[in-house]
Image (cartoon, grey):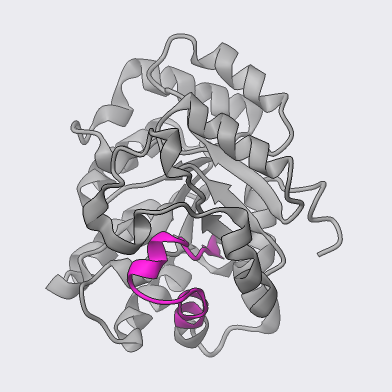
């Protein structure tokens, strides 16, 4: 299973980050574009993650869930700073396919935005309803995420793209220290995703220490694979996104542990049921 991929349709007009200078990404990416790769590389299905901080984006992704049975769930967006968040969450929880939320913290000017009292109050709704949170962060956010988790240790979160370390700047030791802080919270997971866009130039082996440490720190039961397609196309093919993780996992992992990373952890984290019972 692919725990992290996107679709977008430019004419919808709410992808502010997506501009013409982004080359191959500045075009529509829809389910029919991804399906051949899923079939070719035996990927049973995906978790579809929001790429725009709008309600319209969440509604659009849920409409795709209704059309494609290999989309196992949608991680959408709601305004976590809104006083109306609780009511809005209740509405979305009634919709099939809604499995989580993602605030785009990397694009918010205030690094400590998530520590606002209104946001924390709203995150308590997620805890009470057992809804997980994807965190799109960089290393500058770690201090604030750690502070958040000290206040809300039962909040189930997953770190997207291993928190985007600066691989090309030899930042491994600082990143390792930061990830150790997050891994100590039992409700925190980490996605092995987004590698091909973490550096302008790289060899597949460059990612090995990062992948090994994520598995060591979080354990095989709190790690999941994600392609980050189509953003990953900036660095290589869908096959390459998969192969980087496969080739760089610790060799000592058992078949069961590998299955956790490529299937069962995503199923349990996102509470995927209806479409995943037979896989």
Estimate the x, y position of residue 88 in percent, counting from the top left. Answer: 57, 16
Q: Residue furthest top?
A: 83
Q: Nearer the viewer, residue 161 or 68?
A: 68
| Image point (57%, 58%), residue name | 3
Q: Is residue 38 left or right of residue 185?
A: right
Q: In the drawing, does residue 123 fall left or right of residue 236?
A: right
Would residue 229 be counted in the magenta stretch?
Answer: yes
**Residue 152 in view, yes or no:** yes
Q: Is residue 21 above or below residue 204?
A: above
Which residue appears at 23% of the width and 32% of the height?
112
* Residue 231 among those drawn in magenta: yes
- The answer to whether residue 170 is seen in the rendering is no
**In the displayed structure, would residue 198 be above or below residue 203?**
above
> Where is residue 232, by image quadrant?
bottom left
* Image position, residue 203 (x, y; %): 29, 87
- 139 vs 235: above or below: above
Please tell me whether residue 98 is drawn above or below residue 221 in the rendered image. Answer: above
User: Residue 143: horizontal and vertical position, in percent?
Assistant: 24, 43
In which quadrant will I find the N terminus?
Answer: bottom right
Query: Residue at the location (57% across, 49% down)?
Result: 48
For image coordinates 52% across by 82% down, the residue present is 246
189 relative to 109 in the view: left or right: right
**Farthest-out residue, front:** 11
**Number of numbered tags placed on the structure image:** 0
Q: Which residues are magenta?
A: 223-245
Q: Quadrant of residue 67?
A: top right
Q: Quadrant of the C terminus?
A: bottom right
Q: Is residue 272 left or right of residue 158?
A: right
Residue 200, position as x, y percentages in the image: 20, 73
Closest to the observer: 211 or 205?
Answer: 205
């Amino acid at each position: 299973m692919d725990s992290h991929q996107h679709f977008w349709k430019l004419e919808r007009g709410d992808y502010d980050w997506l501009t013409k200078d982004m080359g191959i990404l500045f075009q529509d990416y829809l389910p029919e574009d991804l399906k051949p790769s899923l079939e070719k590389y035996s990927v049973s299905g995906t978790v579809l993650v929001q790429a725009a901080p709008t309600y319209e984006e969440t509604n659009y992704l849920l409409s795709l869930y209704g059309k494609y049975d290999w989309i196992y769930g949608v991680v959408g967006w709601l305004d976590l700073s809104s006083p109306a968040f609780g009511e809005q969450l209740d509405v979305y929880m009634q919709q099939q396919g809604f499995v989580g939320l993602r605030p785009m913290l990397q694009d918010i000017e205030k690094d400590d935005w998530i520590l606002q009292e209104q946001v924390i109050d709203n995150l308590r709704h997620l805890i009470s309803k057992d809804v997980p949170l994807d965190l799109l962060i960089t290393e500058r956010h770690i201090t604030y995420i750690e502070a958040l988790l000290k206040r809300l240790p039962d909040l189930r979160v997953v770190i997207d793209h291993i928190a985007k370390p600066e691989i090309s700047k030899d930042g491994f030791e600082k990143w390792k220290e930061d990830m150790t802080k997050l891994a100590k919270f039992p409700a925190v997971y980490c996605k092995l995703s987004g590698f091909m866009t973490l550096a302008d130039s790289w060899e597949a082996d460059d990612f090995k220490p990062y992948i090994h440490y994520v598995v060591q720190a979080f354990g095989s039961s709190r790690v999941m694979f994600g392609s980050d397609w189509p953003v990953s196309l900036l660095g290589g093919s869908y096959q390459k996104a998969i192969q980087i993780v496969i080739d760089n996992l610790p060799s000592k992992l058992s078949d069961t542990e590998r299955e956790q990373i490529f299937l069962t952890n995503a199923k349990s984290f996102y509470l995927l049921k209806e479409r995943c019972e037979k896989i």
